Image (cartoon, rainbow, N blue to C red):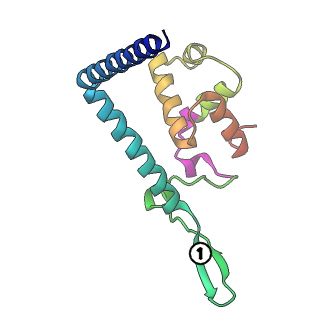
Amino acid sequence: MKKQAIISGAVLALLAVTIKWVEYRYLVLTHSFEIYGAILAILFTGLGVWAGRKLTSPKKEIIHREIEVVVEKPVYITLPAAAAATAVPHPMASPDELGISKREMEILELMAQGYSNQEIAEKTFLSIHTIKTHASNLFVKLDVKRRTQAVSRAKELKLIP
């Protein structure tokens, strides 16, 4: 009786292993592209993390080998000329220095008063598209992305009260 239980258990285990092996083979054959893609993605992610850490870590310089004094050297990053050109203007810049026209100043003041684009268009007798163009130009000149940022930036630069 024990011998029969052991044999049937071994046969069932062998059958289970065979089924899993067939299932694995099917998985590998049908999804090989995805599996290789995932392996490559993991490999390149690891390579990117390693390279990033290697390139951005502070450089170390050994001054004296017997005592092993290690001094970390700072890593300096220089800005390209294009980034220097978009530097933040002086806190007391005038509209002329920033290239802001009189009409754009008028639009900026109305924005600061809380008027919508449609209301500004009605007050200035301009089309809403013109108002949006002036607003877009202001965003570029003030280096902001939204109306609230433009008003805040203009107040910092003392362009509006």
State the image coordinates of residue 142 (x, y, percent, origin top left).
58, 42
In the foreground, 3 or 32? 3
Task: Say which quadrant the C terminus sits in.
Answer: top right
Q: Which residues are magenta?
A: 92-104
Q: Toward which corner of the image does residue 117 lie, by quadrant?
A: top right
Determine whether the residue tagged by mark 1 lies in a helix, strand or loop: strand
In the foreground, 109 or 145? 145
Farthest top residue in view: 1
Left or right of 138? Residue 11 is left
- Does 98 appear in magenta? yes
In the foreground, 92 or 55? 55
Left or right of 25? Residue 98 is right
Q: Residue at x 65, y 25 (%)?
A: 110
State the image coordinates of residue 113 (x, y, percent, origin top left).
71, 24
Residue kind at label 1, given as amino acid type = Lys
Q: Residue at x 56, y 63 (%)?
A: 57
Q: Which residue is mark 1?
A: 60
State the image coordinates of residue 118 (x, y, percent, origin top left).
56, 13
Left or right of 39? Residue 130 is right
In the foreground, 106 or 148? 148
Q: Residue at x 53, y 64 (%)?
A: 77
Is the residue marked by circle 1 packed among few (<14), some (14-19), or many (20+) residues within 10 Å?
Answer: few
Q: Residue at x 63, y 35 (%)?
A: 150
Farthest left residue in view: 29
- Does 42 appear in magenta? no
State the image coordinates of residue 46 (x, y, percent, origin top left).
45, 48
